[in-house]
Image (cartoon, helix red, strand yellow):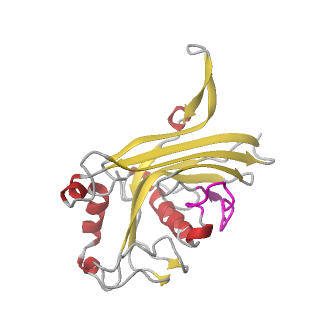
Amino acid sequence: MSNGTGPVNSKIYGKTYAEWTAEWWKWALSFPIDSNPITDTTGEYCDQGQSGPVWFLAGTNNFTAERTCTIPAGKAIFYPVVNALWSECPNSDDQNLSDNDVRWILASWTATGDPASHLTTTLNAFTSSYYKANLDMPISGLMIPAVRIQSPVFNTFLPDNSLLKDACPVPPYPTPMPPGKTGRLLSEGHWVMLPPLKDGEHLLKLHGSGLCTQYLAENGVCNFGDLLFETAVTYHLTVPGGKK
């Protein structure tokens, strides 16, 4: 696991993996719930807010989806297999937590930290003579790593009806999360950066889940070791006129 200061600190398209995770969250949080790529069930919102050399794809918030998406040629693809976000609630004791405190919380308590499980992502298929069938190709088989990493501290601007509108419920927090500029945000997750795909049709699958942590179990949220959430997306991707 890295906070962006280790070997994965090398830059890709001008940013480190850690910096790209912050950019991904800024993108994902910029849309209201009813037109957000994370809550999208069909791929209708796949092209929203996309710019630059890297195209963002989203997982889900605890459901399974099948999405269709057209990606311009020459775009790298960046997406989480599973991830979590810590957000500083206004007028709360969150301000007393140091950045290192938050990093420890993300790594140890959230289900996408140490308790992350069943992490798989595949791109297209390969023919197996042994099984006499076409099998999904793990991205690791394509020499592309899934990187566990934490973001730098960042903030962004939230729309009305944002994904974080219920992140600070009252009670116990004195103030709900308002639209506008946020306080500190930090994230933890397992991420993939795919190089630009060849032209044509591609099948990308991602799956991740998180187990109930001991901290959550001790606080009555769930039973230790139980499946806390699960995300799974099948992407039908089209790249028109891409690399040959």
Q: Position of residue 81 (x, y in %)?
A: 48, 49
User: Is 120 located above or below residue 98 in the figure?
Assistant: above
Q: Quadrant of the C terminus?
A: top right
Decide whether residue 56 is among the magenta residues.
yes
Decide whether residue 77 is among the magenta residues.
no
Nearest the viewer among 159 and 156 is 159
Magenta span: chief secondary structure: loop
User: Is 89 located above or below residue 51 in the figure?
Assistant: below
The residue positioned 67% from the left and 48% from the top of the image is: 196
The residue positioned 69% from the left and 46% from the top of the image is: 237
Nearest the viewer among 171 and 100 is 171
Nearest the viewer among 75 and 93 is 93
The residue positioned 70% from the left and 52% from the top of the image is: 69
Residue at the limit of the structure toward the left, as seen here: 218
Q: Position of residue 72 (x, y in %)?
A: 74, 54
The image quadrant of residue 58 is bottom right
The image quadrant of residue 33 is bottom right
Q: Position of residue 116 (x, y in %)?
A: 36, 47
Left or right, 234 with reference to 21: right
User: Is 157 located above or below residue 15 in the figure?
Assistant: below
**Number of marks:** 0
The residue positioned 49% from the left and 44% from the top of the image is: 207
Nearest the viewer among 186 and 32 is 32
Q: Which residues are magenta?
A: 37-57
Q: Position of residue 31 (x, y in %)?
A: 59, 72
